[in-house]
Image: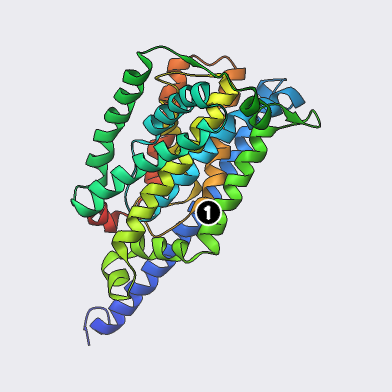
Amino acid sequence: MSNRTGTTPTQRVVTQRGRSEKAAKLRAQLVFLAPIVALLVLIVFFAIATPTFLTAGNFQNLVRQMAVLLVVALGATYVVLIGSIDLSIGSIVTLTGVSTAMLTTALGPWGAVLGFVVGLLCGLVNGVIHVYLKVPSFIVTLGTMFVFAGLALIVTGGRPQALRSPELAALFGGTVFGVVPTIALWALLALVIAIVIEKVLVFGYRARAVGDNETVAKLSGIGVQRVKLLAFVASGVFAAFAGLLLMVRTNSASGSMGEPFLMEALAAILLGGTSLMGGVGGPSRTVLGVLVISVLSNGMNLASVDPFLQQTIKGAVLIAAVALTLNRRELSSVK
C-alpha cells in the first residue's frame, strides 16, 4: 500500500479506468448532440438574419441542394466507417455526370445505366489498388481524384455537355404535387438503401468491425479485403447516382461540376458523428451532418456572404468536425 495516497496500484488503475470510461461516454454524447445543436442554432440565426430563409421557395431550393450532397456523403461514409478515406468522390461525380450526359445523347435514357457502371468501375479501381496493392487509401484516392477529373476533361474536350434526354428530365426533375422536388425523393430512396445496408445487411456490421479493429475482425472470420473493396465500390456507385442527379438538376454536365462536394461531404460525414478512425457512426448519422452543411451554405447564400469567405467558413467547419470526432489515442490506425 502506498504511504502517500493510501491506495494500491490496482486501485489506482481501476480509478483511472473509470475516469477514462466516463470521459469516453461524455465525448460520445458530445458527438451525438453537437450536430443537432448546431443545426438548431443555424436555423434560428438565418431565420432572423434573412427573411426569405423560412419561405416555401427557399425550402425547395434547400432540398434540391441537399439531395446531391446527401447521396455523395452516404456512399463515402462506408469508406470512412472502415477507417479509410475517399478523396476522389468529387471527381467521380464529375466523370459519371459528363459520361451520362454523353451516353444518353447517343443511347437515350438507358445510357444512364452505363453511367452507374462508370462509377462502379471508379470505386473498383480505388478498392483494388488500396486492398490488393496495399497502397494507403489517402494516396490512392488523391491520385485517382486527378485521374478521374482529367478523364472527364479529356472525353468532353473541356466543353459542357447538355442533357438531351427528356425522359431523364421528367423522371428525376420537377416536383411532386408542386411542392416536393422529385430529386429529394430519389435522395430519400438512396438514404433508405444506405440505412438498410448499414442496419439490416451483414455488410454494415462487418464494415464497422473492420473499422473498429481490423485484426480482430480478421480473426473473427470476416473477409476484411472483401469488405474494404465493397466499401469503395459502394462509394463509387453512390457518387455516380449523385452525378446523375446533379446533371438533371443543372440540365448539363461540366468538367468541374463535382469539385465542391469533396470537402462538403467529408465535413458532413464527420459532423454527423462517423469517426475518421473508423468503427463508429454510419449513413444514418451522416444525414445530420448533411443538414448542417446544407443549411449553412443556403443561409450564407441568402445572406450574401462573400463566396471566398464561405469557403473559409466551410474549411473551419471541417477542421472542427475532425477535432470533435477524432480519437487521438488511435491516430496510428488511420489507413
Q: Is residue 216 above or below residue 62?
A: below
The answer to which of 124 and 184 lies nearer the viewer is 124
Instruction: Please state the total of marks drawn on the protein image.
Output: 1
In the displayed structure, does residue 272 sit left or right of residue 326?
A: right
Label 1 sits on residue: 32
Q: Is residue 284 visible?
A: no
Q: Residue furthest bottom?
A: 1
Picture colour scheme: rainbow
Q: Secondary structure at mark 1?
A: helix
Q: Residue furthest front?
A: 107
Within the image, what quadrant is residue 90 found in?
A: top left
Within the image, what quadrant is residue 23 found in?
A: bottom left
Residue positioned 64% across, 33% down in the render:
183
Q: Is residue 96 above or below residue 283?
A: above
Q: Amino acid at mark 1?
A: Phe
Q: Position of residue 329 (x, y in %)?
A: 28, 58
Residue positioned 51% across, 27% down in the render:
107
Q: Position of residue 132 (x, y in %)?
A: 21, 54
Q: Is residue 31 above or below residue 207?
A: above
Residue positioned 38% across, 66% down in the render:
209
Q: Position of residue 124 (x, y in %)?
A: 33, 46
Q: Is residue 91 above or below residue 277?
A: above
Residue positioned 58% across, 33% down in the render:
66
